[in-house]
Image (cartoon, coloured by chain):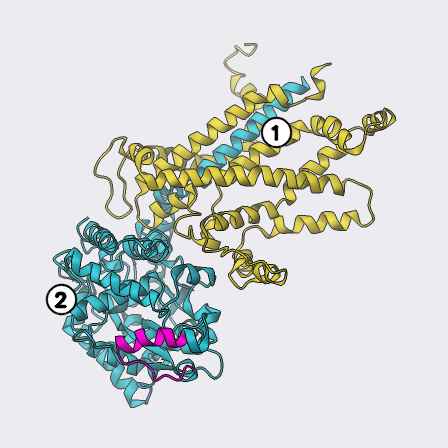
Chain colours: A cyan, B yellow
Amino acid sequence: MKKMVTKILSGSLAATMVLGLAACGSKEAPATTEAPKQETTKAAETAKETVAEAAAANGGDVVLRMSWWGGDSRHNATLKMLDEYMAANPNIKVESEYGAWSGWQDKIATQIAGNSEPDLFQINWNWLWQFSPDGTRFADLKDLSYFDLSQYDQSLIDLMTIDGHVLGVPVSSTGRVFYWNKATFEKAGLEVPKSFADILAAGPVFKEKLGDDYYPLSCGTYDLTILLTYYMQEKYNKQWIVDGHLNYTVDELADGFDFLKSLEQNHVIPTQEKLTGDGADSLDKNPNFIDGHYAGVLEWDSSIKKLSDALEDGQELVIGEYPADYGTPATVYKVSMGFAVSPNSANKEEAAKLLQYMFNGDGVETLALERGVPASKAAQDKLSASGALQGLTYEANKAASANAPFALSPYYEDAALKDSAEGAYQEIINNMSYDGTDSKELAQALIDAVDEVENK
Amino acid sequence: MSNTKTKSAPNNFWKENKGFIFIFPWLVGFLVFKGYPFLSSLVYSFSDYSLFEGISKWGIFNYLDVFTNSKIQTGFGITFKYAFMTVPLKLVFALFVAYILNFKIKGVKMFRTVYYIPSILGSSVAIAVLWKAIFKDDGIINMLLGFIGVEGPHWLSNKSAALFIICLLRVWQFGSTMVIFLAALKGVSPDLYEAASLDGAGKWRQFFTITVPMITPVIFYNLVTQLVQAFQEFNGPYIITAGGPRGATTLVSLLIYNNAFKKYAMGLASAQAWVLFIILMIFTAILQYSQKHWVYYSDEEA
C-alpha cells in the first residue's frame, strides 16, 4: 500500500512539474492565448474609461495611461512635466509606466498584440512598420483635433506616415556622431582625429605609447554595422538600401568589411571577444570607456549626455569631425523617437491634448532636451528663447543633420537585424571578429539578411 | 450504485464530492491560465501564427523546421549539454553538503541557513550583475587566478566557459535540493549505521551501502524535478549572457522566447515548446520506468 502511495505521489509530482513546464516553459503561451484575459482587462478598462468619460462630462476625472522608456533624468523630467500638467488640469489623471530600454520592445509588442497598450506611448520609429504595416495599429493624428502637426517639417511627417495615416509625433531626430575622449588622445600625444587616416594611424600609437588595453575607438556589433553603412555611403555615394535591397554589389560590400577588419587589425577597435569579456551591457557602463581606455565612440547625438556623464573626472568628450577621406560624409540619421496614441483609447482627444502640451506647449521647457533636440518648431522657439537650445547635444545634432544626405530605411533597425541576441548584424559582425570569415561571404550574408527583412 | 433513488441523487452527489468544492477555485485558475494556453499553443503550433500578421496557413511545417533548422538543433544540443552538466553536479554537491550538515557539528543550524540563502535569492537581476562582475575579464575570479600566476579564461566571451558559468549559477543554488536530502538523511535509521560500524564498516562504506540505497526515493525525486527544471532554464542565460557569446548559451527556452517576442513567430515558438515538452515527457517516463531497478522503497519486502 505504502509503495503504491509513494508511486502515485512521485508520478503525480513528475506530471505536475512537466505540466507546469509546458505552461511556463512555453513562454509564448501567455502571449498567444492572453486574448481572453486581455479582452476582459480591456472590457474592464473600457468600462472604466466610459465611466471616466461620463465623470469627465460632470467635471470628474479622466485617467490616461502613458508609457515611455529612458534613463533617470528623462524619467524625472517627464514625471515633473506630468505633475505640472495635472496641476493645471485637475480633471486629468495620468498613470505613468516607465523603465529602461532593455526588454521594453518585447513588452510593448505584447501589449499592442493584446490591444492593451497605454493611451499614449513613446515609440521607436521602425515600430510603425513592424507593428502596423497597414497603418491601423496606431491612431491617425490627423483625426485628432488637438495636436498641431503644422509645427513639424513635412519631410518628418512623411516619415511617420503609412497609407496616408500619420501614426505618431516625430519627437526628435538623431544621427550618429563621432565623439573622442580628448584627455586620452592628449596622453597619446595625438590630436583628436579628423579623418579615417588619422583614426587608422592612432591605433598603433595607442598600442605603443599607452599600452595594449588602449583603443582609439570602441564599437559594438551594431555600431560597426553603422560604421559600415557610413563608409559605404561615403565611398560609393549610394544610399544603403534602395527598393528593398542593399544597394551594393558583393565586391563593394566586401571592401567595406575589409575596412572594418583593418580597424581591428590596426588596433583601432577592440575585438568583439574583448568587448563581451568586459561584461558591460552598454558603453556608458563599461569601465574601460569610463576611465578613458576606449577613447572614441560612434554614437547617437542624443546619447552624448549619458556618455559624458559616465566619464571619470579629468576625461572630456568632444564632438569629432566627420571623416571625409573617401567622399562626402554620409552618417546614419533617423527619427529617433515618436509618440503614438492608441487606437483603442477611449480618450484619444485627451491624449492628443497632452501630446500637444508635451511637444508644442508649455511642457517643452520642463522636458528640454531629454528626448533629443525637439523637431517641433514651437518647441525650438521656446527653448532658444530660454537659452536651453545649446550644448553638446544640440551641436552634435546640428552636425549630424548637416551630414546625412541619405534617408534611412525603416527596416534598418528591424529586430531581425538589430536584436542583440538574435539579429543578423551581430551574427555577421561576430563571424567577422571571432572567425575572420571571408569578406565576400560576410557581404553575401548581409545582403541576404537585409533582403529577407525588407521583403517579408 | 446504491443511490438509485432519483430524488436523493443530487444530495448524495455533493456529499460524496465535497472535495470538489474545495479545489474548484484552483481548477478554474488552472483551466483558464494553464489548460487553455496549453491547448491553444498546441493548436498554434500547427499554424504560422505571427503576432502582428495573424495566421495564413496550417500544417506541420513548424515541426519540420524544428527538426531541420540548424539553429534550433544547436539550441536543443546546448540544452541537453546544460541539463546533463547541471543536474548531476547539483545533486552530488547538494548531497555532499547535506551529508556534512547532517553531522552533529557546532553551529550546524547556522550553516544550514547560510547554505540555503543562494536558493532564496533565485536568479534575480542582482545575481546576474554579481555573476557578471565575478566572471568578467578583470573580475574577481580572474584577479584571484592572476595572483597564483594563472591567466583566467574570458568567461563571458568564451563559448564553453559561458555555458559553464550559467551551470555554476544553478549548482550554487543547491539549497532546496539540499534540504530535501537532509530530511531524507535524517530518516535513515541510526540502527543501520550502528550495526554496520560494529561490523567494521568505515564512513565511505556506510555512505555507499547504507545511506545512498536508503535515500534512493529522494534521489529519484530530486533527479526528476531538477531535470525538468534544468530543461526549462531561462533566467540565467537571458539575464547574464543574453544567449551569447555567439549563441553558446541560447537554450531552447531562450530560443522560444526570441521566436515569440522578438520575431513574433508564435507558431514556431509553440512547436518548439511542444517538442521540448515531449522530450521532457520521454525523460520522465524513462526515469519512472527505471525506478524499479534502482529505487528502494522500504515497504517492498514487507
Q: Are marks 2 and 1 in contact (CB under 8 Å)?
A: no
Q: Is residue A267 left or right of residue B296?
A: left
Q: Callout 1 environment at 10 Å: few (<14), some (14 to 19), or many (20+)?
A: some
* Residue A151 makes an appearance in the image: yes
Q: Chain of mark 2?
A: A
The quarter in which the C terminus of chain B is drawn is: top right
User: For numbered disc 1, what is the local secondary structure?
Assistant: helix
In this view of the protein, can residue A83 be seen by the observer? Answer: no
Instruction: Report the residue marked by disc 1.
Output: B220
x, y percent for residue B76: 41, 38
Q: Is residue A203 magenta?
A: yes
Instruction: Give the foreground label among 2 and 1.
Output: 2
Magenta-drawn stretch contains A139? no
Near-viewer residue (A51 or A24)? A24
Kindly identify the amino acid type of the residue bearing the numbered disc 2. Answer: Lys
The one nearer the camera, A86 or B6, is A86
Residue A238: which disc?
A: 2
Q: Quadrant of residue A146?
A: bottom left
Question: Relative to A383, is A149 above or below?
Answer: above
Q: Chain of mark 1?
A: B
Q: Which residues are magenta?
A: A188-206
Hey, which residue is sitting farthest right in the picture? B198
Q: How many marks?
A: 2
Residue B34, percent across and down? 44, 37
